[in-house]
Image (cartoon, grey):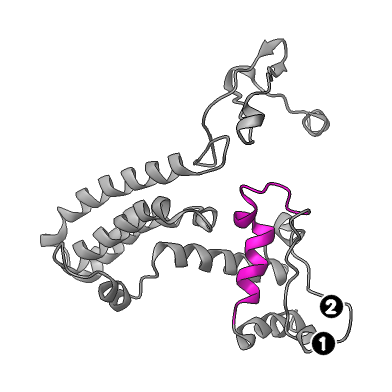
Amino acid sequence: MGWMRANKLKLNPNKTEMLLVGGPSAQMVDVRPVLDGVTLPLKEQVRSLGVLLDPLLSLEAQVASVAQNAFYQLRLVAQLRPYLSKEHLASVIHAMVTSRLDYCNALYVGLPMKTVRKLQLVQNAAARVLTGTKKFDHITPVLAQLHWLPICFRARFKVLVLTYKALNGIGPQYLMERLSRYVPTRSLRSTSKALLRVPTHKEARRSTTRSRAFSVVAPELWNALPDEIRLCYLFGASNK
């Protein structure tokens, strides 16, 4: 609120939603926030930048919504298949379907496979529409032929791109602040390998979402890259 007063902004109680993030114990707390004399009810879900958030940050509602909307668009796109070339059909699929799967997909890293599978089914269906693959044919070779990364790998790729940009000073400041270089207590060969420090369990306090936090996921994925790819960061940094 202090930041808003300093910038001469004011919240509208009629357009403000409140979400209490936490486990089952947090939901038992009787919290009734008041804004300008108006009591704001706690919501089970809120939408932020198009992403549905719930108290447990499970993203199940978000994934279900994306899958439903993407399938709807795919059914419409499938009707164009007789009239478009494969190249043009691919462009339409990327614009109407793949873009929905990729929006904020860095949030999907670390989600249970049963949740991510809903999005993977959409991508599989899109590949079948584009290539004319039958329903019960194996889809993995088709995705490889199209050079389409599966959903879980697309999400990891997005995190790594964000990590590279943050390390090179071309990413958001709030992401840069969550990354730090790994500095061993004594001289080791790993010192020159451009590794990142992984926060401890105490530093990443929310145990339920720790494995999905950017400050944890980004260093783990970055450190798992081959040395020659990681060292590109040092090369890019030296050319600034």
Residue depicted at 73% across the width and 72% down the height: 196
Q: Residue furthest left?
A: 82
Residue 102 shown left or right of residue 16 in the figure: left
Q: Which residue in the structure is indicated by mark 1?
A: 188
Residue placed furthest toward the right: 186
Task: Mark 1 and mark 2 in contact? Answer it, CB < 8 Å.
Answer: yes
Amino acid type at mark 2: Pro
**Where the C terminus falls, by quadrant?**
bottom right
Residue pictured at 62% horizontal, 62% vertical: 217
Which residue is label 2 attached to? Answer: 184
Image-quadrant location for residue 6 = top right
| Near-viewer residue (26 or 164) | 26
Q: Answer whether residue 212 is magenta in the image.
A: yes
Q: Is residue 16 magenta?
A: no
Farthest residue, direction front: 25
Q: Quadrant of residue 192?
A: bottom right
What is the span of residues highlighted in magenta in the rendered image? 203-225
**Neighbour class for label 1 at 10 Å: few (<14), some, many (≥20)?**
few
* Left or right of 107 on screen, residue 187: right
Look at the picture and state if 166 lies above or below 193: above
Left or right placement of residue 128 versus residue 10 in this view? left
Q: Amino acid at mark 1?
A: Leu
